[in-house]
Amino acid sequence: MKMKKNILGVDIGGTKCAVIYGQKEGDTLHLVEKVKFPTTSVDETIANICSEIEQMMGRHGLDSSNTGAIGISCGGPLDSKRGVVMSPPNLPGWNDIPIVRMLEERFGIRTGIHNDANACALAEWKFGAGVGTQNMVFLTFGTGLGAGLILDGKLYAGTNDNAGELGHIRLSEFGPVGYGKCGSFEGFASGGGIAQLARFKVSEKQQMGESVAWCPPGQLDSISAHTVALAAASGDPLALEIYRISATYLGRGLAMVIDLLNPEVIVIGSIYVRNRELMEPFVLQEIEREALSHARRVCSVRPAKLGEQIGVEIRIQHQDIFNSMHRI
C-alpha cells in the first residue's frame, strides 16, 4: 500500500496568491483544499500567507511531523538555491525577500521555491500536455510572461535561475510595456500587455469621436484582458483586432523559441487556454512564416492541460506547486 505524503503549496502571483494542501500518493497528486486571496503589500501578503497556512494546517491536523514540504511558486527573477525572491516585475517591493527561510522558521517544515514558469513546466511535463517529451517549453501567459524549459528530459534553470525570461525579449521598438521594456514579448503576450494595447486602441477610437460599446468614455483604466476577451467572443471587431495583434506577436516570439531550442512541444497556459480559438490561427500563421521549417515541423503548440477545467489563472498554478515539490 502506497503511503500518502502531505504537501503544502504557496503560489505568489502579481494579483492574487493561494495556499494549497495536497496529498501525494505514488505518482498521483490529490488536491484537498485551496484558499486564494489578493496580493497586497509585501508585509501584508506574507502575513496572510502565514495565517492561511496556519489555519489550513489546523483544519487538517497537519504539523511539522506529518507534512513533507512546503513548495512556493513565484514569478522570477528569484534565487531558488538561497530561497530569495528578487524583484519580480509583477511584484513591486519584493526586493531580496528570503521567503523560504521565513516559512521554514515559522513552521519548521522543509521549504523550497521555484520560478512559477519552471513549476508549471514540471507539472505539464509530468502530468499534462508535455507527457512523454524530452524537450518542452512552457509559457505562463498570465499577468506576465515567463517560460520554463525542459531540455533533454530535465528542467533547465540556467546559471542563476534566470533561464526562460522570454518576457524581457524585445519584439518591436514600439508597443505595450512589459518587464520594464517597451515592445517586449511580455508587453504583447500577457494580461497586462493586452489591457495596455486595448486602452491605446480604444483611446484612438474615442478621440476620433467613435464609441466603443465595451468601454464607455472615462472607463479606460477599467479595461482588462478579460474585458477584451468577452467583447471578442461576441464578435466585436476592435476586440478581435487586439487579440489578433497579441497572437501575431506571440507567434513571432514562439518562432524564435523554435529556432533557438528546437522543442517537441510548446505548452501555453492561462490566457491562451481560455482564448485559444481567438489566437491559435494567427499564432500558427506567424510560426509558419518566421520559424525554420525543419524545426517547425517537429514542434506542436498546445494549450496547458492542467488548467483547462477552470477559466482562471490560479488553477493551473495550484497543480504546478504540488508538482514542483518532486524536486524538494
Image (spheres, helix red, strand yellow):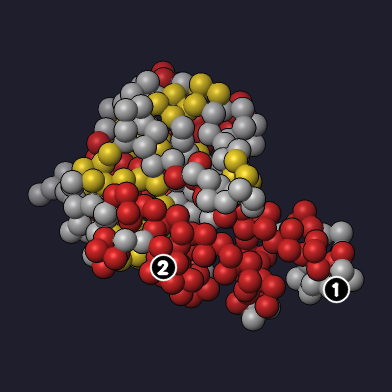
Image quadrant in which the C terminus is located: top left
Q: Can you tell which quarter of the image residue 321 is in?
A: top left
The outermost residue toward the left is 1
Residue drawn at (41%, 68%), measured in percent from left and top?
Answer: 289
State which mark lies toward you, 2 or 1.
Answer: 2
Q: What residue is at 44 percent from the left and 51 percent from the top?
A: 140
Q: Residue furthest bottom?
A: 235
* Residue drawn at point x = 40 percent, y = 38 percent: 115
Work out whether residue 310 can be spotted.
no
Q: Label 2 to label 1, Cα distance in Å?
A: 34 Å
> Is label 2 in a helix, a strand or a loop?
helix
Residue ID at (89%, 71%):
209
For residue 201, side relative to residue 13 (left or right): right
In front: 327, or 191?
Answer: 191
Q: Residues within 10 Å of mark 1 (few under 14, many from 20)?
A: few
Q: Are marks 2 and 1 in contact (CB under 8 Å)?
A: no
Type of amino acid at the residue the image marks with label 2:
Arg
Indicate the position of residue 124 as horizontal and vertical percent values: 30, 55
Which residue has dot 1 on it? 210
Residue type, mark 1 in image? Glu
Q: Which mark is residue 289?
A: 2
Horizontal arrangement in the rendering, residue 303 relative to residue 323 (left or right): right
Give the SS element for disc 1.
loop
Q: Nearer the viewer, residue 243 or 173?
A: 173
Picture layout, residue 261 above or below residue 68: below
Residue 76 point in image, percent of width and height: 46, 35
